[in-house]
Image (cartoon, rainbow, N blue to C red):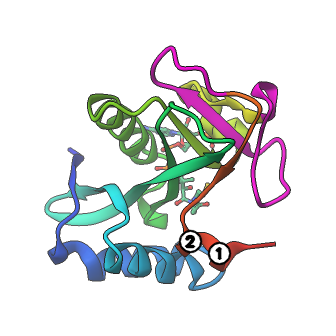
Amino acid sequence: MNTVIQKETSEHYLAVHEILITSFKSDAESKLVTALREKSMAVLSLVALQNGKVVGHVLFTEVTTSPLSKAQGLGLAPLAVKSEYQKQGIGAQLVQEGLRLCTGLGYDYIVLLGDPEYYQRFGFKRASGFGLQNEYGVDEPFMIIKLTDCDIQNAMIHYCQEFSLFSV
Ligand SMILES: CC(C)(COP(=O)(O)OP(=O)(O)OC[C@H]1O[C@@H](n2cnc3c(N)ncnc32)[C@H](O)[C@@H]1OP(=O)(O)O)[C@@H](O)C(=O)NCCC(=O)NCCS
């Protein structure tokens, strides 16, 4: 089945909400996405469509560092594919198109918290290897991919305020 990846519009919100609610253990990710839209914090929000039906979604927001860095980064979160459409490469298409578009927007790196086994195939590496920390107290799942030859190391990465829903 042909999958089309395109930028999310308001017509997709309800379908994305349903995917998020069914893909994650709680409604936190759905609430997060709603809050990010309300505050216009999404730099890039993509949907995967099959026959015009939303089957997947990924979103990118800006992150900041302390100490401040010249390198401009994004956080990838959340990523979800409707359960009956998983394992067909739709997640990979969303990630790869996201990486391509974020590179085009001039960003230097992307971080995420996720399963290393899944994300390393796209080139994500353990962020602690660059001396990067996160506010969630996790090591291995915190990953980075550099999109440019930027100098990003030895810093704390901060997601935007809306992510405080997930604070430890
Ligand atoms: C994580 C998630 C987004 C992956 O989406 P997906 O569309 O299934 O991802 P892909 O199809 O790209 O890859 C998944 C697996 O299917 C395999 N696959 C990819 N294309 C395939 C195809 N055409 N046929 C069979 N298998 C395929 C991949 O090799 C991969 O194998 P793995 O399980 O060994 O890693 C999805 O499982 C999901 O929504 N999970 C719930 C929410 C979640 O946990 N999100 C991630 C938070 S970090």
Using residue 156 as the reference point, say whether residue 111 is left or right of it: left
User: Please, what secondary structure does the residue beneath circle 2 have?
Assistant: helix
Tag 2: amino acid: Gln
In the image, residue 135 lies in the stretch drawn in magenta:
yes
Q: Nearer the viewer, residue 33 or 149?
A: 149
Q: At 57% from the left edge and 29% from the top edge, which residue is drawn?
A: 145
Residue 42 sits above or below residue 147 on the image: below
x, y percent for residue 143: 68, 38
Q: Which residue is mark 1?
A: 164
Tag 1: amino acid: Ser
In the image, residue 77 lies in the stretch drawn in magenta:
no
Q: At 63% from the left edge and 84% from the top edge, which residue is drawn?
A: 26
The part of the chain drawn in magenta is: 128-152
Q: CA distance from mark 2 to mark 1?
A: 6 Å
Q: Which residue is mark 2?
A: 161
Q: At 21% from the left edge and 67% from the top edge, which residue is drawn?
A: 53
Residue 118 sits above or below residue 35 on the image: above
Q: Main secondary structure of the magenta part?
A: loop
Using residue 48 as the reference point, say whether residue 152 is left or right of it: right
Label 1 CB sits under 8 Å from any ligand 1 atom: no
Residue 147 sits above or below residue 72 on the image: above
x, y percent for residue 11: 15, 76
User: Please, what secondary structure does the residue beneath circle 1 have?
Assistant: helix
Tell me the quarter of the picture where residue 144 sits. top right
Give the label on residue 110, or none.
none
